[in-house]
Amino acid sequence: MLALRIFKVSMEATTLLLLGTIFAISSHVFPWYTPALLPWIAILIGPLWTREGMSGRGLAILIVWYFTTASVFGYFFNGARDWNVYYWSVYDVVMAGLGVALLIGLRGWLKHLYNRIG
């Protein structure tokens, strides 16, 4: 929590991080749980592209929106024996997208830090 205060993360983003953490440590996320993320997405949504390039925050929010909509497809896999396609199309895409958003955010943060020092 101290790190979130130091980096001035908003209360809305902190709530979204908390919900995401709960979903990440859950053994299975039922599709009816994910609409709890929609109000926070509506509050935090922003541009995907800025003057500096792609926005890590915008991409992260877009990925969370993708997760909430794609997880509903779990209903169609209810009777399936092999859920690998569902897991690849939902969880793997989300993890890859959040990884890219993290790299973009770190790049922007380091650029900002470098400009501030130099």
Image: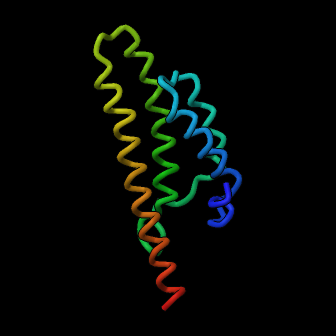
Q: Residue at x 56, y 30 (%)?
A: 34
Task: Judge left or right: residue 116 versus residue 100.
Answer: right
Query: Between residues 114 and 37, which one lies in front from this camera angle?
Result: 114
- Expressed as whole percent of the image width and height from the top left, the position of residue 25 reads 51, 33
Q: How is the image coloured?
A: rainbow
Above or below, 54 against 70 in this view is below
Q: Residue at x 44, y 57 (%)?
A: 102
Work out which residue is located at the far front of the displayed protein and give it. 2
Above or below, 14 against 77 in this view is below
Work out which residue is located at the far top of the displayed protein and give it. 79
Above or below, 57 against 113 in this view is above
Q: Residue at x 43, y 31 (%)?
A: 70
Q: Residue at x 35, y 40 (%)?
A: 93
- Expressed as whole percent of the image width and height from the top left, the position of residue 73 reads 42, 23
Q: Quadrant of the N terminus?
A: bottom right
Query: Between residues 102 and 40, which one lies in front from this camera angle?
Result: 102
